[in-house]
Image: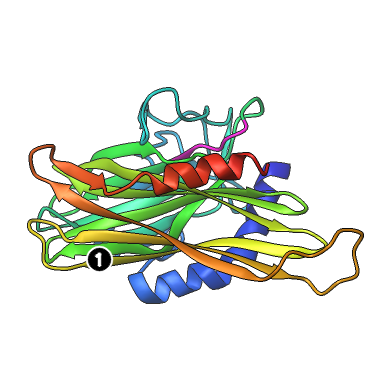
Amino acid sequence: MISVLSRLMLACLLLPCLWAAADAQAVSFPELSSAVPGHQDITYLDLAKMVVPDLAAGDDGFYKGSAPIEMRHIIGGDEGGSPPESINLPNAAVLPVKAGGKDRLTILFDLGQAQDSAEGFAVLALYDLSGKPRLLDATNVATDRNSYFRDPGKLALDPGDDALITMSMHFNSSQGYVSTILILVRDDRFQPIDRIDTFDENVCTYKRTQDLTFQTQGDEKPHAAIKVTVTDATAPSGESCEEAAPQAASHDISVTYHWDSSKSRYIADSDAFEKLSAENEKRF
């Protein structure tokens, strides 16, 4: 229950960002018992049970179940924690997308974390609702304790394709750890574009933040280039502290991803974000 309460508290802190995403890119948080628009005989709970087959409404307003279906981690390899022993799901984040010129629905289910895991377990699910609902793909996108769609939620790469943006994070008293994943839907499966790790600090003498912005560029075919910029900014607090405050500073770190037709994937034009991640690890 403690982990559930912490997830709810963090969600409340993030509501302004989540609402901004909802306004801009149609992320919504419907009741799982409500009908899917345009499909009055199908509820979001019906879709969720394709991921957690025994999910059912509990007496406390949460939806409870046991293990989700088997799935890979979006990054691959040994990434990813274990799902919790029991699932207490308050809601889910819903985002319609375009993929291969077709309408698809994505839902992000943050299932929480196992007691012996430092990471949560968050399922990004892809559905086809053009006929009888089908679960096309499901992958664990959690790289930290709590996971969300990151504002703006998705980017239009061309008239028939969107890229998705998810994030995982946790905070302690003075530090914030955020991992952002860019994801392409290709052939009705989720394909990672890149993972970007950022690190914020808020100590007596200064506040240092690493904020991300996303934009598509040019008219490259079949998919537009994606430019991601991290603005690394340090601002003195003005407080009286034992240590001297650093000077105010700000600089941008940008990477552009171009579609490589021979490899059927996006390729970064530099390793700047890998270097940033390595530099941030030294500050932990």
10 and 204: which is toward the camera: 204
Is residue 14 left or right of 1 when viewed as pictured? left
Residue 152, quarter of picture = bottom left
Q: Which residues are magenta?
A: 118-122
| Colour scheme shown | rainbow
Answer with the quarter of the image where residue 161 lies. Answer: bottom left
The 10 Å Cα crowd at callout 1, few under 14, some 14 to 19, many 20 or more, is some
> In the rendered structure, does residue 145 fall within the stretch colored magenta?
no
Q: Quadrant of the C terminus?
A: top right
**Vertical side of 96 occupied by 64: above or below:** above
Report x, y in % for residue 185.
22, 48
Which residue is rendered at x = 60% and y = 59% of the image? 11
| Residue at x 52% of width, y 27% of height | 82
**Would you name the residue on which mark 1 appears?**
216
Q: What kind of residue is marked 1?
A: Thr
Question: Which quarter of the rendered picture does the N terminus lie within?
Answer: top right
Instruction: Describe residue 208's horizontal placement relative to residue 238 as left or right.
Output: left
